[in-house]
Amino acid sequence: MMLGMSFIVPLLLSAAPLTAQQTADISPCSGKTVAGVWEIYDLFPGTEDLTGRNRYQAYRFLENGTFSRIANSAPIPREMLATFSKANIVSRDTYQIEQSGVMSMRFPGIETPDVASCSLTKKATETRLRGRVVRHGKGDMVLTYFDRAANPRFQLYLKRAAAPGKAKSEAKGR
């Protein structure tokens, strides 16, 4: 069952309260806006402890609705990200994004999809989360994942991966 945005918005507010200005500074994702390689640059635990997982991860979303992921215990080198972006990977992992920005990710052999609210930042901004400041660049992706009971589990903050030879700040337009 796909959750509608009207149901998810109150959950987002409980995961990380958004001001009216912050809500105006984001837009829902679409298949075209997420196509490409994205690196996780920060995460915000909700009810799930992520400390035991590989901290450095990147996702590659294709417009055909498939995606793949790489993870590492150390920062992923830009050259590896460039190879990942061009590799001919046949993935059976799929995603779908509703018009409202709700993303559903399916993995072979797992019956229930992961559900996340997916949004892109319209400008560079800061969000205060439980006393911590998270800085978002223009065009960054924010994924808020939910459990089966529709409770927020955690948020991932992603930026587009830099091309080899470009500084990360240059790739983000900062």
Image (cartoon, helix red, strand yellow):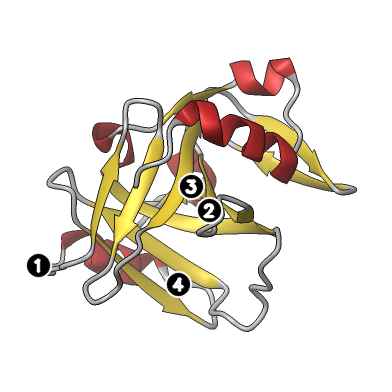
**Distance between the alpha carbons at the discs numbered 4 and 2:** 23 Å
Q: Position of residue 96 (x, y in %)?
A: 26, 44
Residue that label 4 marks: 76
User: Cβ–Cβ below 8 Å for labels 4 and 1?
Assistant: no
Residue that label 2 marks: 145
Q: Earlier in the sequence, mark 3 or mark 2?
A: 2
Residue that label 3 marks: 159
Residue that label 1 marks: 88
Q: Position of residue 24 (x, y in %)?
A: 61, 16
Please indicate, yes or no, whether residue 174 appears anywhere in the rendered image: no
Looking at the rendered structure, the kind of residue marked 4 is Ile
Q: Secondary structure at mark 1?
A: loop
Looking at the rendered structure, the kind of residue marked 2 is Tyr
**Distance between the alpha carbons at the discs numbered 4 and 1:** 19 Å
- Nearest-to-viewer mark from 3 and 2: 2
Q: Position of residue 154 (x, y in %)?
A: 62, 57
- Nearest-to-viewer mark from 2 and 1: 2
- Nearest-to-viewer mark from 4 and 2: 2
